[in-house]
Amino acid sequence: MKRISDRKRTKEQYSEQAAYMTLNRNLIEPLQKYWRFISETKVGTHHFISLTDEGKNALHFLSAGI
């Protein structure tokens, strides 16, 4: 019975990892590399993302039409 819960936990961890990798590839990487709208700071195992000045200007520009 303990084996099943260990397998389930592993599948959940894999799912979280896959979700992060998809988010990173499709959203974070382009905003960071090509547009330079965000910066990423890694502290231990945590990643902190913040807007750069370019990102703040783009947000202001894009939200002006709303």
Image (spheres, grey):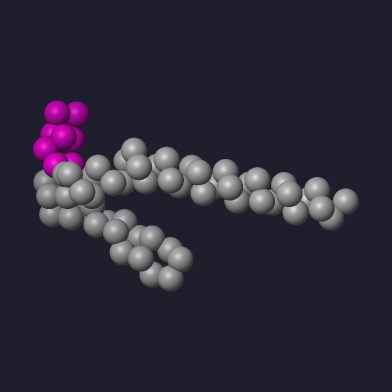
Closer-to-camera residue (53/43): 43
Q: Which quarter of the figure is the C terminus placed in?
A: top left
Residue under the image location 29 percent in, 59 percent down: 40
- Left or right of 36 on screen, residue 15: right
The one of 17 and 49 positioned closer to us in this rendering = 17
Q: Which residue range is magenta in the image?
A: 58-66
In the image, residue 12 lies in the stretch drawn in magenta: no
In the image, residue 63 lies in the stretch drawn in magenta: yes
Which residue is drawn at the image coordinates 38% and 60% (left, top)?
Answer: 47
Give coordinates of residue 9: x percent, y percent: 69, 51
45 shown above or below 54? below
The rendered magenta stretch, by its main secondary structure, is classed as: helix
Q: Position of residue 33 (x, y in %)?
A: 20, 48
Depth check, front residue: 60 or 1: 1
Identified at 28% across, 46% down, the residue is: 29
Q: How many marks?
A: 0
Q: Is residue 44 left or right of residue 16?
A: left
Task: Give coordinates of residue 49: x percent, y percent.
Answer: 31, 56
Choose top left, top right, bottom left or bottom right for residue 15.
top right
Is residue 56 among the parts visible in the rendering?
A: no
Q: Position of residue 58 (x, y in %)?
A: 14, 42
